[in-house]
Image: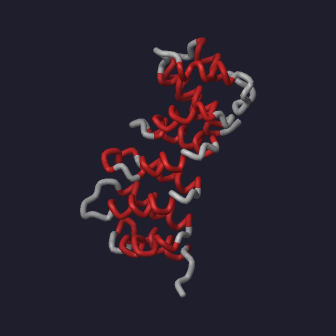
Amino acid sequence: MDEEWRSLTERVRQESGGTAAYRRLAAREDVEGAEDAEELAEVLMAPGQPLWARELAAFRLGLAGDRRAFESLVLLLNHRDPPRCASAAHALARLGDPRTARAAAALATNELRVAYALHPVRLLVELRAPESAPALITALQRRLRPHDPYRRVALACVDGLGALGDARARTVLSEALAHPALAEAAVRALGRLPRQR
């Protein structure tokens, strides 16, 4: 079984107190199976459902490629709790919804939510969508300000731009060389870009 699913169910089991509702949502042989998609979608739509139940349902629907999970997963991608963000990013990467890259780019570049941008940045790298490099370039440019407290986001952008290998990132990665916390990663990232002619 997928490590992300194991981590999610362990966290949610503790949060839910191991209730019967938790056991019904989590005790599935085929996590990605869509045989109970209607029941899972009902959990997303029904009022008064606890967050852990919505998260489990959205995660399973996302892995099954059911686009009804999209809105819930995007909300979870922008949650203040990093494990929820990580689970949502994992499911969104497998959902196959064309809106995912635009949503992740919007979250990665939203200065009001920059504290929660790490997982959207990582998701953009995994997606390798047309929106990925421009969003990471924008996010990194903003992190190069003096005394910026979001070094983890900046480092994820640097590493991601190197992984994407988009030549448009050369300027911002060169600027990152002047920041001691980013310099080593920026050298590696620049080495992965196509050679200039």
Q: Is residue 165 above or below residue 5?
A: below
In the depicted view, which residue is nearer to us: 43 or 87?
43
Most extreme residue toward the top is 20
For the point 68% across and 21% down, the residue is 27
Q: Is residue 47 left or right of residue 65?
A: left
Q: Is residue 146 above or below residue 85?
A: below
Q: Is residue 68 above or below residue 123?
A: above
Most extreme residue toward the left is 146
* x and y percentages locating residue 28 in the rendered image: 71, 24
For the point 67% across and 37% down, the residue is 65
- Quadrant the N terminus occupies: top right
Q: Is residue 4 left or right of residue 131?
A: right
Most extreme residue toward the front is 98
- Residue 3 appears in which quarter of the rendering? top right
For the point 35% across and 45% down, the residue is 113
Q: Is residue 65 above or below residue 53?
A: below
Q: Is residue 1 left or right of residue 159?
A: right
For the point 39% across and 44% down, the residue is 116
Disc count in the image? 0
* x and y percentages locating residue 164 in the rendered image: 56, 65
* x and y percentages locating residue 156 in the rendered image: 46, 58
- For the rendered model, the colour scheme is secondary structure
- Residue 157 appears in which quarter of the rendering? bottom left
- Quadrant the C terminus occupies: bottom right
* x and y percentages locating residue 35 in the rendered image: 74, 24
